[in-house]
Image (spheres, grey):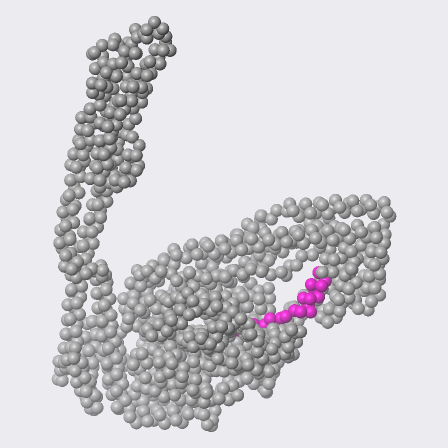
Amino acid sequence: MLKMVKMELIYILRLKELVMLPTTIFQLNHLTEFHHFLNKQKDLTAAEKVKDLINKIYKCDFVFTFCGHYSAGKSSLINELIGKPLLPSSPIPTTAHKIKVSRGNDAVKVYFTAKPTLLFPNCTDLKLVDAELLDKDLINEVAVNVSGIDLPNNIMFVDTPGIDSIDKAHMLAAESSIHLSDVLFYVVEYNHVQSEINIEFTKQLVDSGKSFVLIINQIDKHREAEIPFQAFKDSVEQAFVASGAVPERIFYTSIKAMDSSKNQINELKQFIAAKMTHKDSLMEASADQSFLKIKTDHSKAMELKKEKELAEAGAPLVNLTAEKLHLLEEDFHTLEKKLQALQQTKVQQAELEAGFLAIIKDAYIMPYAHRELAETYLNAKDKKFKLGLFSSKQKIKTEQEKRLQNFHSILEEAVQLQLLGPLTKYLETASGKMGVNTAAFKEEYLTTPLFKLEKKALAELVNPNAQMSETYLLRYCEEVEDYIKSSVKKEANKLFSILSSEQDIHTKEQERIITEDQRRLETLLHAKKKKDQIANNWLKWQEALNQLIENRRENAADNYLELIDDETEPVIQEVNAQKLVKELQRKKQTQVRSKPEQMLANPEEMLVQLDFISAQLQDLKGFKEVWRNLQRRTETIRNKQYTICLFGAFSAGKSSFANALLGHPLLPVSPNPMTAAINRILPVDKENEHGKMVIVWKSKEDMLGELQDYLRVFHENADSLESVQLVIDRIKKSSAHFSASHHRYLEAFFEGFPSHKDMLGTVSTASMEELDQYVSVETVSCFIAKIDVYFDCSLTRKGIVLVDTPGGDSINTRHSELSFEYMKAADSILYLSYYNHAFAKADRSFLLQLGRMKDSFEKDKMFFIMNAIDLAKDQEELDLVFNYLYDQLENYGIRNPRIYPVSSLFSDKEPYIGQMDAFKESLLQFIEDEWLPFMLKAAETDCMASIQMLEDFIKSAEMEHAKQTELIDAWKREEQELNLLLAQQKHTYLNKKLKAEIDEQVHYLKQRIFLQFNDWLKESFHPGLLKGENRRQEGEKALDDFLFQLSYEVEQELRAVNLRCENYYYAQRKELYELSLKSIRQRNKEMIVQLDYSVKLSGVITHQAPFRTMERGLFKKALSYYKNPKAFFEKGDRKYLAEEIKTVMETESFPFFEDEKSRLFSFFDDTLEKEKLEMIQSLQAQMQEYYSGKAELFQNEEIRQKMKEALLTIKDSNVWTYADSI
């Protein structure tokens, strides 16, 4: 090993020496030999990288690579660095493949994966080129040669697609550009520096031995009032240091604010110039690093291949000790002897059968004494037998029974001792010899006697016509003995047959076991041989690699030329500028909103009228339920809170947007991520004054459940918060890799638990000035469930509650469930997207759920905010981003979305003040249009009906007395009939409809899940993860990602199904209510009976798919299809893996979906039954109040007078607007 390391060091020194020469033939030839070696080893990925390296060395290209966020400004940055606006820049993804920029004659070359190269001469306008291309998906890279730019010859800038684009192809294109980079710049946008994907990607770079320079672009977005710039820089450095992704340098740049003192664009240019000055040594170092990296990766790949092959071949041997391995052949021969012994079974059976037959035959059961008793019995049976002088038939019969009993008793004892006892013991012993479970056989067959001698049988054997003699006595005794032995033999044969059958079964089973053991040993012997062969092949590979390094041939032929990319004659194509003339801003169909009906009163007027009418009816007999209904209506209008929920991806500007809506900088604003609790801004009330803050801390149970979700990612668990601390500490010390979000959350808990554990499960108060420390400090905020801030402003005075939610992901099921409940209950949903990231991966899952739920909402309550439009370069770019966002929303099922471009940062400044005002006006108009007309119209209808009922009561009271008595009796009968009618109503058809709806919804849910199955698999099992460096860990990680994503998507789908079923339930309940009310009104049109259709379900069904914790052994076969990246992605092994996983999931998910159907039906069916009973009780109470009030009206003059006065007061009042209609 030391020799190998020494030779590698010598080789590196020689390589460094040779690369300084004008030609690098020696180095190129050696790399070519290495390329051939890799091909022979079938490591095609490494071979392709060596070929790339050979071409780079040959062409002396020095490469600066720019990768990072899409819309981080990479293209604009390159344009500034080269001094020419060459690359297209836009807040939406534009670079879909590598673009290489170098100095030369103006021309663009487009390289495809499976078609000839296109050359666009005398052209550098990439927009014109793009308009000419049809097969954009087949583009591999674009090379642009430009004259008059600030780049020396052989210096190349490479622009790559954004790594967080929703398009996987973009990310792969970016990753494939890195291994040839001499200087790698990772560019991030100011507001997304600490996003998870940045931390993850740069960590992978460092782990692979690749250094990078971090550029934080667009620092013109920094606001000193939000966070001091130095504090921002410190937090950035701390975040990257904590993740282990430490950059070589960090630059803070802006193309817009070129004169800013914070802008380091000039320092960046100087840094690049210095790199160019030392490019020869840097290229040498880069080439060395690339070669060693490829060789190391190949060695790792081969090591993994060896381990995999040894593991697969040696899997049968894993539990064997060295001694057992040595005895394998001896064990095999032992089994052969056992098999031969089993084949002697029939001989043994014959011997044992002869043994029990001999026992029966030799049993001595009829000695002389027994024959004497037989003789006395036979004498008594003789027809001439008498008992002295006083003999009678009865006495003779009695004597015969007595003698039979004596004979039977002694004979029965002999049979037991001489025959049955020995035979039973023999059969018991034989069962053991025959390999049958003796205890079980004895328990089942030998606990009861084989034979029972009956007196009746002895009597029946007597020949009534025979003359008593010695000869007949002997014959009779022989017949008795034959009868006993033949009966016993018959039963014994049955038992022996059972034993023989059991033995045969046992023998066959033993033969099967031995045969299987033989096959197992054969497999082990074969595995041992194969394992030895693999180890031998590994030694040969090591020798070949060592020989390749040690025996370099200085005079080798120039074989490298065969690997230099052949610049075949490209197809020349001219550009047509007319193709680019397009309409940039699409005409979107204007959403025409119908005007609401003219409101008959405003809310304040209606409240006055409701209070007035309620006061007149409050004490009237028969109007108790009517008065209560008016009171409920009054409270609904007076205390209605209109909930607006804010959702959006990290750093979309939710906090600054909320502040703009409130007109006050209440919520803390920061470009860094903050652990999300729920923040609610509520109107003040009597108990809660302006500025009061109520902090609800998570319960210990919720905190533990949330942590368990995260620990499950690492296949860990904990049963207490204290043990979570130990688990996190163990994970930190292990090689387990935290993603950025996991790291922040678990670290925050780890550090904050000692000082905040006593707060869990409690509620505390503070003032809103302290909000920042509860929201921004992660070691505090991760323990908080909800923060309520009572704030008095024009928005909250309208009853509006503003909710900032945490959102959800595939890990934290509780956040996902909570977000769903807020979405469902919200009166309006505001979704914010960031102008520079109009639709990133973080948005996708949430918008998919919104698309699922949209049709289930009674009203379209979604508003989409395109925030930070102050970043727009011009109107044309703004239109482009608007259209892009519109299209993406429609792609996810959100038709005709309402999009409002705003700038929350400059919402109070021109020219952006108008956009925010326009949105506020639309939102408030939506509230007034959708909510107030409905509420006020319902209140007006209730008032009119109440007054009409009062009039009808008074008219009834003025009838003649005789008619009144008759009417009271009729009312009593009517009330009884209606009560009976309600009790007898059958609604089973509603239950059946409900079940059919649930079955149908879950059926289509499963179809949707499995239609998207392959897409999710491709996202998890992607080339960025499956690199072949550690096949087992990579496969398991991809499987974990897939199962977590699948669980999340299934849960989201189930929540949407739950909502659809809930709406269907409300429709069925409405049908039930209307049917009952119709039955009552058909009998009595005067009576007012009402049911509350607006009552929502009190219970909540939560959904947690079990796939995150599935037994990973179920996927062993599926993961075996991932052998190496090339076979997986190019030879179709991914298809086999997908089919196998799908087969497993279809089988394993069936019980879960059946159970979910049952749960849904049970929930809604039980609720329907409960609400049926409550409906009947409510209607009966209202009817009882009505009929008793009517009856007392006739009997009490005071009541009649009060009703008349109340009606007169209403008619004469100026308060009731509609008095003239009475």
816 with respect to 1138 (left or right): right
**Quadrant of the rendering where the N terminus is positioned:** bottom left
Q: Residue extending furthest front? A: 389
968 with respect to 1112 (left or right): right
Query: Image quadrant of residue 24?
Result: bottom left
Choose between 546 and 107: the one closer to the eye: 546
Residue depicted at 29% across the width and 30% down the height: 449
Residue 545 at x, y = what percent? 17, 76
Residue depicted at 80% across the width and 51% down the height: 1192
Residue 1186 at x, y = what percent? 75, 53
Q: Residue extending furthest top? A: 389
User: What range is drawn magenta here?
Assistant: 629-647
Query: Image quadrant of residue 520?
Result: bottom left
Choose between 839 and 1113: the one closer to the eye: 1113
Residue 1211 at x, y = what percent? 83, 64
Decide whether residue 632 is among the magenta residues.
yes
